[in-house]
Amino acid sequence: MASKAFYAVIAGVGAGTGRSVALRFAQAYPVALLARKPESYNDIVAEIQKAGGQAIGISTDTADPESVKSAFEIIRKEFPEKKLAAAVYNVGAGFAVKPFLELQAEDLSASLASNAGGLFNFAQATLPGLLDSVEDAPYPPTLIVTGATASVRGSNRFATFAAGKFAVRALSQSLAREFGPRGVHVAHTIIDGVIDIPRTKSYNVNEGKADGKISPNAIADNYWYLHTQHRSSFTQELDLRPYVEKF
Amino acid sequence: MASKAFYAVIAGVGAGTGRSVALRFAQAYPVALLARKPESYNDIVAEIQKAGGQAIGISTDTADPESVKSAFEIIRKEFPEKKLAAAVYNVGAGFAVKPFLELQAEDLSASLASNAGGLFNFAQATLPGLLDSVEDAPYPPTLIVTGATASVRGSNRFATFAAGKFAVRALSQSLAREFGPRGVHVAHTIIDGVIDIPRTKSYNVNEGKADGKISPNAIADNYWYLHTQHRSSFTQELDLRPYVEKF
Amino acid sequence: MASKAFYAVIAGVGAGTGRSVALRFAQAYPVALLARKPESYNDIVAEIQKAGGQAIGISTDTADPESVKSAFEIIRKEFPEKKLAAAVYNVGAGFAVKPFLELQAEDLSASLASNAGGLFNFAQATLPGLLDSVEDAPYPPTLIVTGATASVRGSNRFATFAAGKFAVRALSQSLAREFGPRGVHVAHTIIDGVIDIPRTKSYNVNEGKADGKISPNAIADNYWYLHTQHRSSFTQELDLRPYVEKF
Amino acid sequence: MASKAFYAVIAGVGAGTGRSVALRFAQAYPVALLARKPESYNDIVAEIQKAGGQAIGISTDTADPESVKSAFEIIRKEFPEKKLAAAVYNVGAGFAVKPFLELQAEDLSASLASNAGGLFNFAQATLPGLLDSVEDAPYPPTLIVTGATASVRGSNRFATFAAGKFAVRALSQSLAREFGPRGVHVAHTIIDGVIDIPRTKSYNVNEGKADGKISPNAIADNYWYLHTQHRSSFTQELDLRPYVEKF
């Protein structure tokens, strides 16, 4: 079911999950892609347009409330009349892996701001639109939030990163409990493994076995599936890991 | 992707989830349906056959190892040459809700036998076949196990039922960790709400709101989705609840 | 606060945790010690008596309801007039670590019977007495249940053992929710490490570091602490692990 | 075991848990009490001194790294030669209960700063001292962190508060995994109920039943107990709730 009357917005596009999610949702909706720098979205916008889809890219720092507000003003201008069907928060900055006493206060604040702060701003900007689409959207309006192993486990040397990811999970749960009964599906995912993207090409994980890294296209399929779930059976938290991953 | 070279087996069919799952998987595979009594599967078998599918029903007590062995001997005769693509354990007996001191030892043993014992027998009977299909099945061979709220929460007055469901979850996790790396997808679901079936017609849940009970067809769609997940991104545990459910 | 008007009962005494718990609670109460064989409790009974305490040992198979009933008849004869202050379920049989397809149905039923079945019987036998002591016992009457890593994690090759331990945890939660509000403290512990007992002497864990195995006396201190918690702040689940344990 | 060669520091003292914890630890050690305003610690300092103990109060904003550094400079001057035995982080600001769309970005940043930021600063200031005491302290040096129901559950209308509390839990887990093996006990508590303090006097919880609110003295006893646990059996997370609390 594709619709031109609705759009999707994806925050945190780049070479990995965000790109795949953008391409997947663009098969059904015009998409607005947010990233801090144009080089993160330019190619994806072009790729979608080439395939006959509709896409815009907007340079946005989701950690900055003003930047997010400004992005959505642009979206409203670019997509007049369109209503919001789906919003994906896939921003993953603030990654620092260090002994605790070597971490700086800035490591913590960066992780909290980019993870929790960014989701907060993004959710405040998208939830009114998602609520507004409950009656007539093709699927239950959906907010999907990308999490990680560090969302449920504070590992040694991951203190600040886990703090940000735990906080994101808290927000997601709270939003699910508040907005679910109003018809908006809020889902949080636990990506429990290394994603197969250019940056991780050299990583040797799971003994180099085939499909030992998570395919970003597979993640995108899962996100699309979450979006299309019937409202009588919403999933709140989805774990995803390679078949060979230890857990 | 439909295949006549593979079959699916569903244990615990009846008027609810099992029926919907059977119909869903029958769109792709011949199916073997197990239930204790013919009246639980006869109509479903007929419905599938009428729609052009292939189905057999076998009276089976999954809590009894001999009964399970006998069922799979029949399957091998009825489906010679076919390999196993998916197995669903949906047996849900042993339900007793009582103050603890009114429960009998039999309430516990019935819950443990039908839930954990049945899954144990079913998994022992199906895992060799699932392993054997890893190389050539249309999707990663899959064992899906139905759980409930009581799988993760021992509520007041649910002692014996929760004991059975917790045990099922333990088995599912252990199987996922052992057989995942060998290519078999083992998933456990948390059905967190009342399913909309004939038996629950009169239940007033979630203030009678539309879709306040879980659609068994939606559960079936979710199970099919789990079956088709790419092996680089298996879900181990899937929670499903109505948008209006408190949790 | 020691009392001769109350007694404690410990099921599953032997060379390890049970012995230490027995000695610890015997400092405050007469104790009844249950084990399958006299050689498991004889020395402990003697040790307690030598130290001026009061102890009886009763050969009991907690997995057998009749055996448990008979044990408590003996207790009532041996400890006439005494009321029950604390009950500890520390039975840990059913341990099998094998690939799933090598496990037998008997491995599962043994684990379920000794873990969940035994706790069921023990709880049914002790909760009436614990309830009866709420008004006048020196501390809130307490039922403590020993769990393990396998209570919260179904590891590869631990299928049947985890099933039994998960089921025990379910029962414990349900009992805590039912009997807590009536004044009985039900606590479940997660012993997450190897206990330092004769049987594990040769185990090389945590690189052989000092205190890398859990001291059974330390467990006993923790159990006594749980027993003495104020009823405004009960702990339901207590994890215990060596400082050097990976988790 | 009391020692004048070691001291304890408690951040977040006031009329409730912090006061009780301060009084409890002051029975064994000189204590440094941190709070934003002198009126939060003055009476406690006086009470401890009157009882023959040793205490200092320092106005500190734990959310501010400079303020924390300055506080520990004062401590080193006031307690020259003393080593750190225990540190308790009990700061609980950032509480806002509102529909998500009424929350401001400041509500989130206040919760993250006071909860996670404060713990980060406090842990960086205390862990070197705790490590330094491992060899000769009377008990394993301990960092205890106060959590709440919102540490493990993102409830409706608690989005920003839960974000802060989840983040604190992440930090605590990560610190436990890093510093446990080096001999420092890091424990996180889940205070699951209303604490019985002046501010909650009028709250009607648990139907007004006796001990239906958590006694701050009982919390203090639990904290002291955590501090004294043997290093072969550390508890990482301790839940505490009134016997009548629903959970």
Image (cartoon, coloured by chain):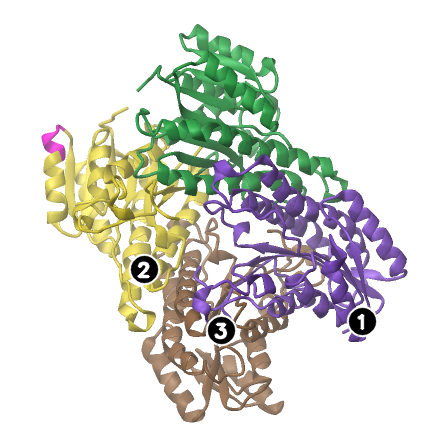
Chain colours: A brown, B purple, C green, D yellow
Mark 1 neighbour class, 10 Å CA radius: few under 14, some 14 to 19, many 20 or more: some
Taken as a whole, is the magenta stretch helix, strand or loop? helix
> Magenta span has B142?
no
Give yes or no for contact between labels 3 and 2 (Cβ–Cβ under 8 Å): no
Dot 1: element: helix
Location of mark 3 (residue):
B210
Read off the residue under disc 1. Answer: B49
Residue D14 can be seen, yes or no: no
Q: Residue at x 80, y 71 (%)?
A: B49
**Residue at image coords 17%, 44%:** D74
Q: Please report, as a chain letter, where disc 2 is located.
A: D
Q: Is residue A70 left or right of residue C163?
A: left
Q: What's under tag 1, amino acid-wise?
A: Gln
* x 48%, y 10%: residue: C47
Residue identifier under label 2:
D161
Image mark for residue A190:
none
Residue A49 position, x and y percent, is 58, 90
Say if labels 1 and 3 share a chain. yes
